[in-house]
Image (spheres, rainbow, N blue to C red):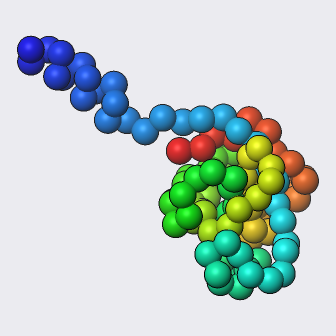
Amino acid sequence: MFKFIAIFTLLFSQQAAFAGSVTWYNQRGRMANGKTMNPYSFTAAHRTIKLGSIKTICYKNHCVKVKITDRCNCNGYDLTPAAFRKLNPLRKGRLNNVKIH
C-alpha cells in the first residue's frame, strides 16, 4: 500500500506542462472581470480557464506569470503587450509551442 501511495503522489504532485500558442491583444475597454484593460500589466485572456487563475507561460528561455482576467475567442492565450514582449522581444504576432504551467 505504501508503494502505491508513493507512486501516486510522485505522479500527480508535479504540475503538468502543456504546449499551446499565444498571441497578443491591445483592446481598450472593460474586460470580463469588469476592470479596464491595462496594456502594461501581465494579464491574459483565455476561453475556458477560471478568471483569476495564475499561469506560467514559457517560450524558449523566457517565462512570464500572467493572471487570467478576460475571455477570448481564440484556441490559445491572448496576452497583453507587456507580457508578450517579455516572452518575445521581437514582437512576432503569434508564438507556437509555448509551455504552459
Specify whether 50 is left or right of 11. right
Q: Quadrant of the N terminus?
A: top left
Q: Nearer the viewer, residue 78 or 90?
A: 78
Residue 83 in sight from this viewpoint: no
- Of residue 87 and residue 36, the one placed in the foreground of this image is 36
User: Does 6 sit left or right of 69 as displayed?
Assistant: left
Q: Viewer-proximal residue, 4 or 14?
A: 4
25 w.r.t. 29: above or below: above
**Does 16 appear above or below 37?**
above
Please determine whether, in this image, residue 22 is positioned above or below residue 35: above
At 24% from the left and 29% from the top, the residue drawn is 9
Q: Give the percent coordinates (x, y) of residue 2.
A: 9, 18
User: Residue at image x 80%, y 49%?
Assistant: 74
Marks counted in the figure total 0
Is residue 21 among what the camera can see?
yes
Percent x, y for residue 4?
18, 16
Q: Position of residue 71 (x, y in %)?
A: 71, 62
Residue drawn at (69%, 53%) of the image: 47
Looking at this view, is 31 or 38 the one in front? 31
Q: Residue at x 60, y 44 (%)?
A: 100
* Residue 7 placement (x, y as % from top left): 24, 19
